[in-house]
Image (tube, rainbow, N blue to C red):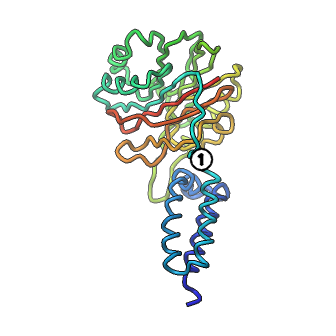
């Protein structure tokens, strides 16, 4: 009888330890640290389960222990529950449209429902580019394309160029980055659009080496950026908690939000990101499904 509920206590302590110390999980042998960090918000679902088990088994012992993972989860994700600090600024959209998307016009129509000022797309094939141009129309007269990433803007583009974030093992035809300087009403902003390599999940865990190498190269470019205002829009194939994106997330920040974007049928993680420096991403949300396997995400940017 004395042991009733102590299994719940042990589980609560373990969940709290993972939430509070996820950075201490070694990232070897399949990148277990990155796996945990990708799905970290979902550990919050254990709190009501543990509370129910604790109430049933030994409330006086188990229920106080359940506060540990609850406090740890709120410490990480509590800001998501706070209201947005909306203000005047820009609206930006990021979307991996999928190279198998058969409805570019319908996809763009969904993106334009939030009246964005900037739209970044990845997996834009050359043969599909005319259809996307036609769908954006004259409201977005400024467009930059490099490889399979593209940016449409309401405002003039003063500079543009390719962004080399290619891992060493990839061929020269792999081009998934661009940099542009957009002249917004609030001043010039260096806008980066990037699509990092995919992370493969197998029985041995994450295969994330190319993604991590590309993230490191992107981080170097961001660190060398001369403009004070920087905006990154991209499919980074990782969440902001994933240590593999540390070279990027150490230099840029975003709004606290879940806004899951992948997979589109049942989103469990946000691997599409909008981050900034010298400006503030005040809110972030997912948009309705398009013809892609990703959901679009939108953000409000204030200055």
Q: At 59% across and 75% down in the image, what residue appears?
A: 9
Name the residue tied to disc 1. 241
Pick the quarter of the image with the N terminus. Answer: bottom right
| Depth check, front residue: 99 or 252 | 252
Task: Give the percent coordinates (x, y) of residue 197.
Answer: 50, 38
Q: What residue occupies the far left of the structure in this picture? A: 102
Rendered view: 33 above or below 12: above
Name the side, left or right, on which 197 lies relative to 264: right
Task: Give the percent coordinates (x, y) of residue 274.
Answer: 55, 32
Rendered view: 38 above or below 224: below
Q: Quadrant of residue 303?
A: top right
Task: Give the percent coordinates (x, y) of residue 157.
Answer: 55, 11
Q: Number of numbered discs present?
A: 1
| Depth check, front residue: 218 or 120 | 120
Name the side, left or right, on which 19 lies relative to 292: right
Rendered view: 188 above or below 264: above
Q: At 57% across and 86% down in the image, what residue appears?
A: 3
SS category of the residue bearing label 1: loop
Q: At 58% across and 22% down in the image, what residue appears?
A: 88
Disc 1 crowd, CA 10 A, few/some/many (<14, 14-19, 20+) = some
Name the side, left or right, on which 250 lies relative to 39: right
Q: At 58% across and 80% down in the image, what residue appears?
A: 6
Rendered view: 10 above or below 302: below
Task: Give the percent coordinates (x, y) of residue 145.
Answer: 47, 18
């Amino acid at each position: 009888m004395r042991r009733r509920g102590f299994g719940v206590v042990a589980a609560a302590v373990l969940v709290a330890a993972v939430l509070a110390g996820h950075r201490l999980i070694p990232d070897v042998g399949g990148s277990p640290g990155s796996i945990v960090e990708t799905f970290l918000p979902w550990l919050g679902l254990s709190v009501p389960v543990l509370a129910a088990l604790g109430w049933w088994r030994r409330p006086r012992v188990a229920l106080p222990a359940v506060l540990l993972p609850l406090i740890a989860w709120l410490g990480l994700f509590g800001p998501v529950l706070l209201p947005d600090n909306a203000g005047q600024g820009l609206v930006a959209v990021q979307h991996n449209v999928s190279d198998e998307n058969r409805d570019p016009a319908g996809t763009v129509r969904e993106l334009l429902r939030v009246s964005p000022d900037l739209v970044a797309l990845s997996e834009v094939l050359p043969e599909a580019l005319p259809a996307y141009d036609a769908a954006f129309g004259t409201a977005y007269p400024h467009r930059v394309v490099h490889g399979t990433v593209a940016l449409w803007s309401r405002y003039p583009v003063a500079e543009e160029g390719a962004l080399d974030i290619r891992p060493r093992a990839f061929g020269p035809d792999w081009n998934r980055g661009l940099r542009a300087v957009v002249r917004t009403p609030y001043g010039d902003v260096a806008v980066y659009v990037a699509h990092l390599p995919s992370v493969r999940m197998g029985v041995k865990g994450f295969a994330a080496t190319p993604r991590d190498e590309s993230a490191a190269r992107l981080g170097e470019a961001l660190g060398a950026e001369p403009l004070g205002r920087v905006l990154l829009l991209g499919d980074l194939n990782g969440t902001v908690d994933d240590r593999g994106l540390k070279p990027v997330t150490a230099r840029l920040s975003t709004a606290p939000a879940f806004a899951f974007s992948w997979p589109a049928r049942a989103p469990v993680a946000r691997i599409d990101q909008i981050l900034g420096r010298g400006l503030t991403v005040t809110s972030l949300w997912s948009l309705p499904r398009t013809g892609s396997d990703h959901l679009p995400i939108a953000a409000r940017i204030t200055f």
